[in-house]
């Protein structure tokens, strides 16, 4: 059976799912199905929360999706955080911090955190974010090899610098590059995926 794979720039304000069984959600939320006429059986590989944006992989191959989700591959995020982050806070995030995951304490694994000297070249932020209206912000590159629910947001908040904008730019060797929100491109995905 032939499988199909896509890379998507999931925009801010969209759920990482094709549709919903809840009428209330169908009336108020936006879904991946509005971006493209995807083939039957398509599913997102992992998720990005509604207020996050960036690279999302889609596939019709459930086995591939499961392998990627469980293999501990690198995922790189660009996080714009509230305030001028300190070297101490960056070190703390990189060594692992305690966050809550579904009501339980979880210590994140060590990760690579880099302070960016200037704002990255990204499409304009959604106006709903109201970034930088009152305080300065800092940009970080955060590379993790796990993917707990809202993990990056919880990590920056745990050290006192809440994330105001979060963009995933890489999963393994697949990069967002110069895609724009709502873009959908076919992509070749091979295993091993790293």
Image (cartoon, rainbow, N blue to C red):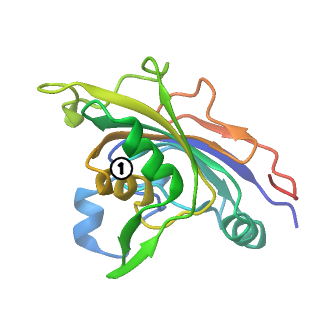
Q: Residue at x 34, y 36 (%)?
A: 86
Is residue 100 or residue 44 the one in the foreground?
100
Q: Give x and y (percent) for residue 92.
A: 43, 51
| Tag 1 residue | 156
Q: Give x and y (percent) for residue 137.
A: 28, 28
Q: Give x and y (percent) for residue 85.
A: 33, 35
Q: Residue at x 37, y 68 (%)?
A: 99
The image quarter in which residue 62 lies: bottom right
**Badge 1 element:** helix
* Left or right placement of residue 183 versus residue 160 in this view: right
The image quarter in which residue 101 lies: bottom left
Is residue 182 or residue 155 the one in the foreground?
155
Q: In the displayed image of the protein, which residue is found farthest to the front?
A: 88
Q: Is residue 53 above or below residue 149?
A: above
Q: Is residue 137 above or below residue 74?
A: above
Q: Give x and y (percent) for residue 181.
A: 46, 33
Quadrant showing the N terminus: bottom right
Q: In the displayed image of the protein, which residue is found farthest to the left?
A: 134
Count the marks.
Answer: 1
Q: Residue at x 69, y 71 (%)?
A: 70
Res 131 visible: yes
Q: In the displayed image of the protein, which residue is found farthest to the bottom?
A: 104
Q: Is residue 124 above or below residue 109?
A: above
The image quarter in which residue 73 lies: bottom right
């Amino acid at each position: 059976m032939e499988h199909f794979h896509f890379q998507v720039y999931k925009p801010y304000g969209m759920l990482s799912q094709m549709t919903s069984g809840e009428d209330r959600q169908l009336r108020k939320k936006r879904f991946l199905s509005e971006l493209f006429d995807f083939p039957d059986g398509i599913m997102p590989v992992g998720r990005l929360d509604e207020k996050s944006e960036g690279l999302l992989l889609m596939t019709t191959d459930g086995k591939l999706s499961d392998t990627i989700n469980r293999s501990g591959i690198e995922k790189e995020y660009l996080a714009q955080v509230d305030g001028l982050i300190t070297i101490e806070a960056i070190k703390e995030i990189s060594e692992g911090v305690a966050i809550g995951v579904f009501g339980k304490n979880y210590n994140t694994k060590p990760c690579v955190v880099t302070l960016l000297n200037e704002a990255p070249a990204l499409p304009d932020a959604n106006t709903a974010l109201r970034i930088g209206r009152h305080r300065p912000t800092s940009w970080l590159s955060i590379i993790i090899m796990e993917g707990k629910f809202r993990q990056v947001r919880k990590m920056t908040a745990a050290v006192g610098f809440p994330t105001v904008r979060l963009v995933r730019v890489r999963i393994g060797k697949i990069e967002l590059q110069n895609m724009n929100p709502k873009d959908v491109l076919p992509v070749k995905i091979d295993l091993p995926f790293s």
